[in-house]
Amino acid sequence: MDIRRLPQAMCALARWRMGWRDLLLQAGLLGLVGLLALPAQAQWHERRATAMGTSIHVELWSEEADVAEQALTAVITEMHRIDAEFSPYKKDSQLSRLNAQAPKGWVEVSPELFELLARSAWVSELTSGAFDVTYASVGRYYNYRDREAPDAKTLEALVQHINYRNVELRPATSEVRYAVEQVYVDLGGIAKGHAVDQAIAKIQAFGITQASVAAGGDSRIIGDRRGQPWTVGVRHPRDPEAVAVLLPLEDTAVSTSGDYERYFDAQGVRYHHILDPSTGSSAKGSVSVTILGAQSLLTDALSTSVFVLGPDKGIDLINRLEGIDAIVIDASGQMRYSDGLAGLE
Ligand code: ADP
Ligand code: MG
């Protein structure tokens, strides 16, 4: 498979790459969070909400207040819709229905769910299986809030069933079947990115050309901020109040995956929510991975993937992809960049 053929035409980021190099202010590990909270101007409209287990923040520019309000409402409604359809925790979601029925036979799903599964499989191929939505065959037995991990026997029995090829897809009829009974799918590594892309499409449908949508660690911006670049901060992985890097960006998607989002520490080991599909245990090697690209769906999935691959293999992969860049903070705390961002060190 030609890894340069991305699922959708990736808009060339070369011009922004130049921009990144010129504009990127490497903030060292300084606390610059105050800079992110500049007051909005009169025609900036914003909304905050909670969906998909994370905080949503939408900002957009419109001179018509009612258009702005309609767009903001459309975005939040869309986020809740996606949450309701693709949450594995909600018993009546489409994904829960699939997890219950697909081990027994073919299940017809919506074109949207089919597409998400097909794109997930595409990313699995691209990343040699580092990204795998069936990670949850084991991952479902972790409970970070209650400090629970699967016991050795459960892990050993189930890790063999983590394999995206166990999710069989019939495009002609939009049907899905799991090849093995123990398979369980969780779209947590890609659904938020999809939601952000959908939100941006909703905003663009109102004719709005300057906006920012953030869902937890996944953000996408369109246009600039009235002649200035937007500023997206990458959180310091060990200090929630501090920013590791400030990224001045325009027309870009940016996703960060970290080992500090959902985790617990026990016996000197950090049990966090990004699992290496080959072991069923939390991925080691990085503490934070940020991916820049054109589309949130891909930056979201790739931030999880590069986290699993580790800094060396992860950055190698990103260097082979057109229009995608990475900033990795490795386990020793060192900041590492893909070639498109070289020179920042
Ligand atoms: P978040 O923005 O939710 O912190 P990430 O983009 O870092 O998330 O993705 C982590 C989520 O991805 C996990 O909570 C889990 O749902 C899912 N996940 C974990 N490991 C994998 C994996 N190897 N492949 C695909 N998805 C994964
Ligand atoms: Mg991700």
Image (cartoon, rainbow, N blue to C red):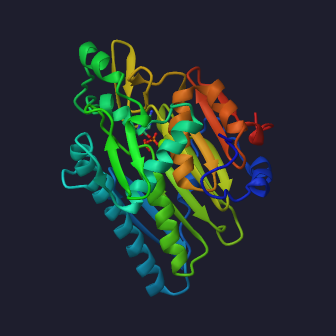
Residue 94 x %, y %: 27, 55
Is there any visible trace of residue 236 in the rendered image?
no
Residue 41, quarter of the rendered image: bottom right
Q: Residue furthest left?
A: 91
User: Ligand 1 sits in which quadrant?
Assistant: top left
In which quarter of the view is residue 133 placed? Answer: top left
Task: Name the residue located 70 percent from the left edge and 35 percent from the top edge.
Answer: 337
Res. 113 in view: yes
Work out whether residue 271 or residue 178 is closer to the camera in this orientation and state it: 178
- The residue that appears at 41% across and 24% down in the rendered structure is 282
Report the number of discs. Answer: 0
**Residue 278 placement, left or right of 89:** right
Q: Relative to residue 290, is residue 142 drawn left or right?
A: left
Q: Residue at x 52, y 52 (%)?
A: 297
Q: Position of residue 288 (x, y in %)?
A: 54, 34
Can you say which quadrant of the picture contains the N terminus?
top right
Q: Quadrant of the C terminus?
A: top right
On screen, residue 126 above or below 196:
above
* Nearer to us in this view, 343 or 314: 314
User: Which residue is found at the position 58% from the left and 50% from the top?
Assistant: 254
Where's residue 90, x and y in %? Answer: 22, 51
Please give left or right for residue 81 compared with residue 309 in the image.
left
Q: Tell me which corner region of the image, top left, top right, bottom left or bottom right, holds residue 162.
A: top left
